[in-house]
Image (cartoon, rainbow, N blue to C red):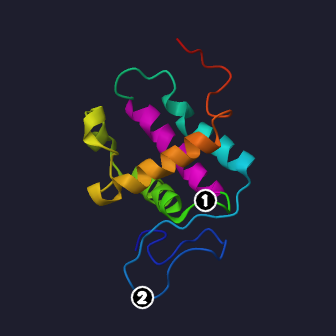
Amino acid sequence: APPGACGDDNGDDKGGDDDGGASDVFDGPDDASQDEFCAAFTAAFEPLAGVDEDPTEEQFEAFQDAVEDFGDVGTPDGIGDTEREGFEVFVEAIDGVDYDDVKDLDGDDGFPGVDADDEDKVEAFFTYASTTCIADSIPSDVTTE
């Protein structure tokens, strides 16, 4: 079985349903500080900063790694259930999607790797993160036009 197939293996005792079911839903920490959350949210997208067209495979893999790190940080305690589910769906989807499946997507295709049923949750998460981290969401070395 691949690593993590039988529950998580990160030693935090928080995740990994061991009920014998097929649950593979990501279960990151839910006690991050707002500063930790916002820093990780911003860092998750830094590999894509300045990408005007489709990212290269290397840029996308760096994005996947940064999103995995974001998942390891988790969300603040006060996040709503829908927003938290959106966070989990987003982290899991980015981890599981292949570069070949996303390189030619356009903005109308939705979130890569996210089922249509979950897109509202992911959108709610991004609204939460953007609102929560508005002051921290633009890296200081990025110029706006």
Q: Position of residue 124 (x, y in %)?
A: 46, 51
Q: What secondary structure is found at the residue carrying circle 1? A: loop
Q: Amino acid at mark 1?
A: Ile
Q: Amino acid at mark 2?
A: Gly
Count of numbered tags: 2
In the foreground, 55 or 81: 81
- Residue 98, compared with residue 28, is above or below; it is above
Q: Position of residue 57 (x, y in %)?
A: 38, 34
Classed neighbour count for the residue bearing mark 1: other residues with Cα under 10 Å, few (<14), some (14–19), many (≥20): some
Q: Is residue 49 left or right of residue 76?
A: left
- Residue 58, compared with residue 114, is above or below; it is above
Q: Residue at x 35, y 52 (%)?
A: 119
Secondary structure mostly seen in the magenta stretch: helix
Extreme-top residue of the structure: 145
Q: Residue at x 44, y 73 (%)?
A: 5
Return the mark for residue 20: 2
Q: Position of residue 97 (x, y in %)?
A: 35, 50
Position of the N terminus by quadrant: bottom left
Whether residue 98 is in magenta: the answer is no
Q: Residue at x 60, y 50 (%)?
A: 69
Q: Residue at x 74, y 54 (%)?
A: 33
Q: CA distance from mark 2 to mark 1?
A: 29 Å
Return the mark for residue 17: none
Q: Position of residue 21 (x, y in %)?
A: 39, 84
In the foreground, 138 or 57: 138
The span picked out in magenta is 56-75
Q: Is residue 61 left or right of residue 14?
A: left
Residue bearing mark 1:
79
Q: Earlier in the sequence, mark 2 or mark 1?
A: 2
Q: Quadrant of residue 32?
A: bottom right
